[in-house]
Image (spheres, rainbow, N blue to C red):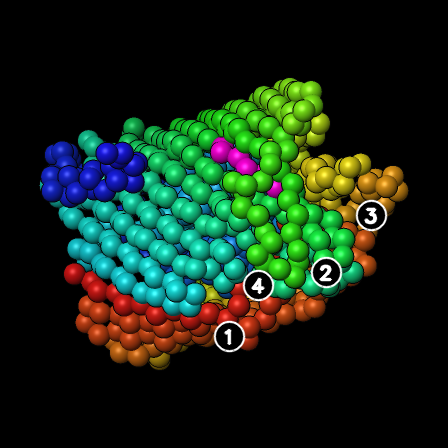
Amino acid sequence: MRITPLAALRVAALLLFLTNAPAALAADPDTVSMKHDPARYGIVVSATKTTRALLEVPNAAVVVRGSDLRRTGARTLADALVDVVGVETGGGSDAGSRLPQIAMWGLKEIDALLITLDGVPVGGPFNPALEQIAVDDIDRIEIVKGPQGTLHGVSAFAGMVQVFTNRAGVEKGTATLGGGSFDDIHGRLNLHRAVENGWNLDVALSGQSSDGWQERTSSEVERGRVSVAGPVGRGSLAFDLSGFQDRQDWGSPLPVDAGEPLPGFETDRNYAVLGAVQEHHTVGANMNFAAPLGDRLRLENTIGVAKDRQNSIRSFPGELAGDTLASEGVALRPITTTMFDDLRLVTGFDLAGRHDLVTGAAITWGRTKAEGIGFDIEELVSDESSIPHVGDVPVGDNRSFADRRTLLGAYAHDEWTPVRALTISGGGRFDQANEKLHAFGQEVGGSPETADDARTDQSWSGDIAALVRLVPDQGAGALDVVNLYGNLKSSFKPAAPNLTEPEGAKILDPERTHSIEAGVKGRAFDGQLGFDASIFQLDFHNLVVSNLDENGEPELINSGHTRFKGVEVSASISPHAIPGLSLSGGWAHHDPRFVEFTFVTPDGELRNVSGKIVELAPRELWNARAAYAPVRWLGGWVSARHQGIRPLTRRNTFFAEAFDEVDAGLTFQAGRVRLGATGRNLGDDRHYVAESDIGDSQFYVSPPKRYSAEMTISF
């Protein structure tokens, strides 16, 4: 009998739940204990690695409540982030139909963002592994825009999204069962137990099955997590063991020419080879530890390890001759192993005012290797039955690759408050990035080709910021708090992993950013009104983009100088007179452009797109949301969002039309039972959500109108 990692995790969960944790002494407050706190949504740790009120962070930052996600029936990370002002996200990317391409400030390169789960980067030093995030197990999401390299290293190159799992709840447990469009069935079980001497045990199990909105894109997901947290001496310890199996049949993007789908292609058709799939079998463990070393000195450590065994089979539409479509595909079995450790000292002292100093060092290590084949297929666009199965396709080539990355960094960051009205913060970080890449390829009947590359890059990142308190907390009059903020930041990072065939497998030049941001945030009318307005400019050098080589094959290249600038405004209202009612909205104007970028087309023509808008980046965005969430009985919510026209090509010759989306839902709470019904994309707008980095001029399309309903019982 074969025992899978997830099955072993279930057994471990049962055993842990039936036993008591070790005895220990009471803990002091810290930033890693993950305790249940109703006020936690106004406190963030992502921007400073210390607990700070959101209004005290000199940066555009947002917190998304996990309770809101469960109330609105969020099933994907796109659902979770869709109402954050200025953040672009949609269902679909090269990683699969359930995983989004996240963009901030108009920047749509996923590897430029740091995505963490309880402080540990998902995907390690490689591209973020969004499949590791269980949306139904989120306590809160902290979003910090702009470079965060000083405290978080090279992965937080242009912003970060930090996810915290849901644990240490008030109830002993919750059980959820739901379903919806496309034969979706999902369930979740969360158990919480307070055991001896302040220790807590949490178990989370979930599963989901769906046919998918696109043909042949069914999916199945099983997840499990066991967490123990409690005091160790005067400190605290939180340990997680998690695992999941995620299989989604992969769906092809839609080929587009001159701004329109190629003739004969249908939005919901899947043109991928039969048997195309994205599959993950992942196990991981995280640990957060904190211990006081004195009255104002604390040691903290975050450690995470993960191993992901994958099966990836994909094919992308290629040349179309009459009714015959020729496509190229790759079948790989990657294995990715990652490790992360961040050890830091948090110090408070007085010297011409109050100082909060964070110093530390971190290592992020990862290795990914894979073996597989490349293949070519032909099919008739008019006849679905003509698509071959991958098991029946002749092997075109054999290929393999191995990439190892090690990121080392040491940092220091200080917040100095010389007077109550002013806080000045800043710091620096020195990072070293080492990468070693090997690729092998051999056409059937041809000679083997290999490529080896290695690179070491070293550089500094830094920031300086100021927060001016124009109206101190608990000020008189209509305004409670008004804070001005501004910052200057710079970061560097190694280029995205370039795992292609041997002739294109090379390590690209590192990317660099410099940004400036200024804004005002505050609270008014006894906390009933909150607001934040900011302006920014981010200059990006050596941005890695996808291009076609001389053979018409996709390759990654450095793009020179790209500039992102804009304005973002958000506000929220929660009137005391109507408890449970909230109104929020935001508007953003983005202007992302290539400043200096030239490249050569496959036919040898030089293209200069300097001054053009970055592909698929809207200039105008707005969102609005109204929700009524009473403690008992009937509630509801509705949200709307808009994006303006977006260029489909680097030369800005064709544009996608502006689009609007509306979501809505109803909730009913009675005692320990909550019912919810949700509708998404109610206008059934089928806009493009992301462009493929592999298929040329191919776009992923928004999921259609869909509904879901679920019941949750607390016990």
* Residue carrying label 3: 610
SS for dot 2: loop
Residue at 80 percent across and 36 percent down: it is 550
Name which residue lies at 38% across and 38% down.
282
Q: Which mark is residue 262?
A: 2
Identify which residue is drawn at 36% across, 76% down. Answer: 666
Residue 25 figure quarter: top left
Report the mark closest to the observer, 1 or 3.
Answer: 1
Q: Amino acid at mark 1?
A: Leu
Residue 276 shown in magenta: no
Amino acid carrying mark 2 in the image: Leu
Q: Earlier in the sequence, mark 2 or mark 4?
A: 2
Q: Amino acid at mark 4?
A: Asp
First in sequence: mark 4 vs mark 1: 4
Pick whichever, 383 or 101, lies toward us. 383
* Labelled pair 3, 4 in contact (Cβ < 8 Å): no
Which mark is first along the chain, 3 or 1? 3
Disc 1 to disc 3, C-alpha distance: 38 Å
- Badges 2 and 4: C-beta atoms under 8 Å apart? no
Q: Does label 2 or label 3 sit earlier along the sequence? A: 2
Element type at marker 4?
loop
In the image: residue 604, left or right of residue 49: right
Which residue is disc 4 drawn over?
A: 268
Q: Quadrant of residue 291?
A: top left
Q: Position of residue 627 (x, y in %)?
A: 41, 74
CB-based contact (under 8 Å), mark 2 and mark 3? no
Mark 1, residue position: 682
| Magenta-drawn segment | 329-334
